[in-house]
Image (cartoon, rainbow, N blue to C red):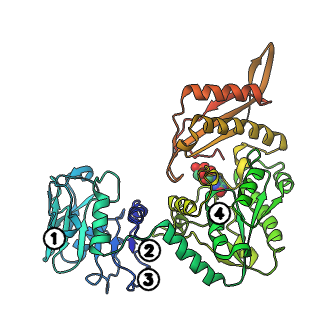
């Protein structure tokens, strides 16, 4: 169990531990279940706060500390010091960035097998200047005497550096020493064991009821469908809605892939309703709301054609779950990405979310374990409102056609050149801007499109992809030669932040 004090790295601790095939959960420091015997260890995360601040997060560790092995990381370590009689003060040397653990007690179980002088990553403004009685210093850097400690009379450790970040070279080994060595976790939490466990619990939860699920063509909803299919077979009805805002030929090819996977899937062509609903609208958020509303109407109607349905399945994943209960509250939603958040309320169905404990990369691994074909597993993320937010301004059938043709050239080019899998997401955006060009002897006055390709791990931050100039030149030529109405192609070289991935 990881107690979160609001650090930007808390999720990373969880990911590293799960990479060691040990299951863990994150809970807010002030709202966590009292650990039962299934909790083998507790980690206290870092925090943007200082322990000396009156509003700093102070957890109640009664009945946990001293009973269950505990590891405090950064703020967590400082809290264990400050609260139990030591002293934490603002640091007057630089404690940010790489440092070497020049002294390390490799006889301590946390540091078993660690190389003296190993690189660690520091990131704090305060530092521990005095440790309480019974605390032993087990690691020091040149600048930080108490880089690591252990409480001699109990199974509690503290480290002021961050083992979860990549720059701490042997950080994974340290976390492994804690969860496997000290806590005694077996490390048998694998995609396969997750599938077995989830299929069993889904059967128990759902019994003989029927379930509906909305497929988007993306990885999350597809993996959720496969899991449920394995658990309850044809009592799951999946619904794939064509909102008329999908990529070229995507509706047919994705529907076909779902059928080949053996899913009980219904395709619904509602493109006319969406395109009609968007007529005359140019504000991005209004577009999103209209699309969300029509989707709910279409899905609701279709779902109620399924007899006796009791459950709505959703592909919610762990970051959405943690976000909604996080210490800092849900972070300011800059765009209303969760377009169909209103679905469960409207439908009066019970909700089942088989992926709610998984990170994105874990969802992919589970998909692989379930035999999901690569064509779905490795697809780039695609926004729910689809091409509507890639046509800046009003959406019309003619613009959709232009954008689809240009997008098809870019995406198939990425696939052919081997760049598709190196890019996190790619898109073409149609601008409401016309510019002058010449074609043959004619002067043209036509639209500009933007190519956007980014690298990212989670979409929260992203950098533009450094695609080769020759490749960009070829795509640009093809688009201008083949797509009617486009005479200019530009490449977007903005990172997120401050730009976003989509243009709307
Ligand atoms: P931004 O544009 O905020 O996008 O950098 C981050 C990721 O979210 C996707 N996105 C959306 N997904 N509904 C969705 O389901 C939306 O309204 C939406 N807007 C952006 C975007 O494609 C990228 O992957």
Spatial CA distance of label 1 from label 4 is 50 Å
Q: Is residue 217 above or below residue 84?
A: above
> CA gap, disc 4 to disc 3?
29 Å
Residue that mark 4 sits on: 221
Residue shown at 31% from the left, 65% from the top: 176
Determine which of the numbered discs, if any, sits on residue 131 in the image. Answer: 1
In the picture provided, is 436 more to the left or to the right than 134? right
- Is disc 3 in contact with disc 2, using a CB cutoff of under 8 Å? yes
Q: Is residue 418 above or below residue 217?
A: above
Question: Callout 3 environment at 10 Å: few (<14), some (14 to 19), or many (20+)?
Answer: few
Q: Secondary structure at mark 1?
A: loop
For mark 3, what is the residue? 33
Mark earlier in primary sequence (4, 2): 2
| Identity of the residue drawn at 26% across and 49% down | 98
Q: Secondary structure at mark 4?
A: helix
Secondary element type, mark 3:
loop
Q: Earlier in the sequence, mark 1 or mark 3?
A: 3
The quarter of the picture where residue 76 lies is bottom left
Nearest the eye: 223 or 342: 223
Q: Position of residue 60 (x, y in %)?
A: 34, 81
Is label 2's Cβ within 8 Å of ligand 1? no
How far across and how far down the image is residue 314, in percent?
Answer: 65, 69
Q: Residue at x 55, y 46 (%)?
A: 424
Spatial CA span between label 3 and label 2 = 8 Å
Which one is earlier in the sequence, the residue at label 2 or at label 1?
A: 2
Do callouts 1 and 3 mark residues in contact (Cβ within 8 Å)? no
Mark 4 or mark 3: which comes first in sequence? 3
């Amino acid at each position: 169990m990881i107690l979160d004090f609001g650090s930007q790295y808390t999720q990373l601790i969880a990911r590293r531990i799960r990479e060691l095939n040990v299951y863990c959960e994150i809970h807010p420091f002030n709202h966590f279940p009292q650990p039962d015997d299934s909790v083998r260890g507790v980690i206290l995360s870092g925090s943007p706060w200082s322990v000396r601040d009156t509003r700093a997060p102070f957890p109640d560790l009664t009945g946990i500390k001293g009973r269950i092995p505990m590891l405090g990381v950064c703020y967590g370590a400082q809290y264990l010091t400050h609260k139990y009689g030591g002293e934490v003060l603002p640091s007057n040397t630089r404690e940010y960035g790489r440092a070497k653990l020049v002294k390390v007690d490799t006889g301590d179980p946390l540091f078993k097998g660690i190389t003296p002088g190993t690189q660690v990553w520091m990131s704090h403004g305060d530092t521990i200047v005095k440790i309480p009685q019974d605390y032993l210093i087990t690691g020091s850097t040149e600048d930080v005497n108490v880089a690591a400690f252990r409480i001699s009379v109990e199974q509690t450790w503290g480290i002021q550096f961050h083992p979860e970040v990549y720059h701490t070279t042997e950080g994974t080994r340290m976390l492994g020493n804690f969860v496997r060595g000290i806590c005694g976790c077996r490390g048998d939490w694998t995609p396969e064991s997750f599938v077995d466990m989830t299929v069993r619990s889904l059967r128990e939860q759902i019994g003989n009821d029927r379930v509906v699920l909305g497929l988007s063509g993306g990885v999350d909803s597809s993996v959720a469908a496969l899991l449920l299919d394995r658990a309850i077979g044809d009592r799951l009805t999946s619904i794939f809605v064509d909102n008329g805002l999908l990529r070229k030929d995507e509706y047919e090819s994705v529907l076909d892939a779902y059928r080949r996977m053996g899913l009980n899937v219904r395709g619904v062509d509602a493109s006319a309703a969406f395109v009609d609903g968007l007529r005359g609208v140019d504000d991005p958020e209004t577009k999103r709301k209209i699309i969300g509303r029509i989707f709910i109407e279409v899905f609701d109607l279709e779902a109620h054609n399924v007899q006796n349905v009791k459950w709505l399945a959703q592909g919610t994943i762990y970051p959405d779950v943690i976000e909604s209960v996080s210490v800092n509250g849900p972070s300011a939603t800059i765009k209303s990405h969760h377009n169909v958040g209103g679905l469960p309320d409207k439908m009066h169905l019970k909700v089942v979310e088989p992926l709610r404990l998984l990170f994105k990369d874990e969802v992919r691994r589970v998909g692989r374990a379930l035999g999901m074909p690569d064509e779905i597993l490795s697809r780039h993320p695609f926004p729910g409102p689809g091409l509507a937010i890639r046509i800046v301004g009003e959406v019309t059938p003619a613009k959709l056609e232009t954008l689809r043709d240009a997008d098809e050239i870019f995406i198939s080019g990425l696939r052919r050149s081997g760049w598709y899998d190196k890019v996190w997401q790619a898109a073409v955006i149609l601008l409401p801007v016309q510019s002058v060009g010449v074609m043959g002897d004619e002067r043209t006055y036509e639209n500009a499109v933007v190519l956007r390709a980014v690298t990212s791990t989670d979409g929260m931050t992203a950098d533009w992809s450094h695609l080769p100039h020759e490749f960009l030149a070829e795509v640009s030529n093809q688009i201008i030669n083949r797509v009617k109405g486009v005479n200019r192609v530009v490449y977007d070289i903005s990172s997120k932040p401050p730009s976003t991935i989509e243009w709307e």
